[in-house]
Amino acid sequence: MRLRDFFTDDAVSLDLQASTKDEALQEMVALLRLDERSTQTLLKVLKRRENLGSTGVGRGIAIPHCRSLVASRLRLAFGRHAAGLDFRAIDDKPVHFLFLIVAPPLEVSNQYLPVLGRIAQFAKEADVVERLRRLREPAEFFALLEEKQV
C-alpha cells in the first residue's frame, strides 16, 4: 500500500487561500471533486470530527479525516497554506500542511487507520516539513512520497 494510490493527480493544492479552518476544509474537500450535496455532507462530518479535537498534529501539519457514505473508496488530498492557519494544533502553532483522508464507513481492505498512521509517520520525519515547504509543483509532492516509500 502506497499513499500515492489514494490520490488523484489534481488532489494537491500548493496554494490554499483560506483564512479560517472551515475555509481550509472547504478547499480541501473541493480537491476531491464531489457533487455539491456530497461536498456539504462531507464538510459537516469533518467539522463534527474537528469539534471532538483538532487534527492538528504539530510541526505545522493537520490530518483532517473522517468516514462518510459519500466516499465509495478511500481518498486523499494534500494542501499547503503559506501563511499558516489556526487549527488549534496540539503544539498551538499554525498549520501549513493539510492531509485530508476520507473513507467509506466500511472498507473491505480496512486501510483507513493504516493510511492515517502512515501519514503521521511521514510527517514526523526530520526533513519532511522543510521539503513540503519548498515544493514548487504537485509532481514534486508525489516524488517525495515515492522517495520516502510511503
Image: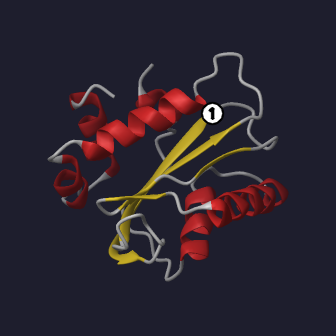
Instruction: Give the left or right position of residue 39, taking residue 97 as reference.
Output: right
Q: Residue at x 48, y 27 (%)?
A: 5
Instruction: Identify whether 149 is placed above or below 75.
Output: above
Judging depth in this view, the residue of 119 and 8 nearest the camera is: 119
The residue that mark 1 highlights is 74
Q: Residue at x 46, y 41 (%)?
A: 9
Instruction: Identify whether 101 is placed above or below 92.
Output: above
Amino acid carrying mark 1 in the image: Leu
Location of the C terminus by quadrant is top left
Instruction: Give the left or right position of residue 122, taking residue 89 as reference.
Output: left
Residue 65, x across and y down, in percent: 59, 49
Instruction: Identify whether 116 is placed above or below 78.
Output: above
Q: Identify the secondary structure beneath mark 1.
A: loop
Residue 93, x across and y down, in percent: 33, 73
Residue 42, x across and y down, in percent: 74, 55
Judging depth in this view, the residue of 69 and 7 nearest the camera is: 69
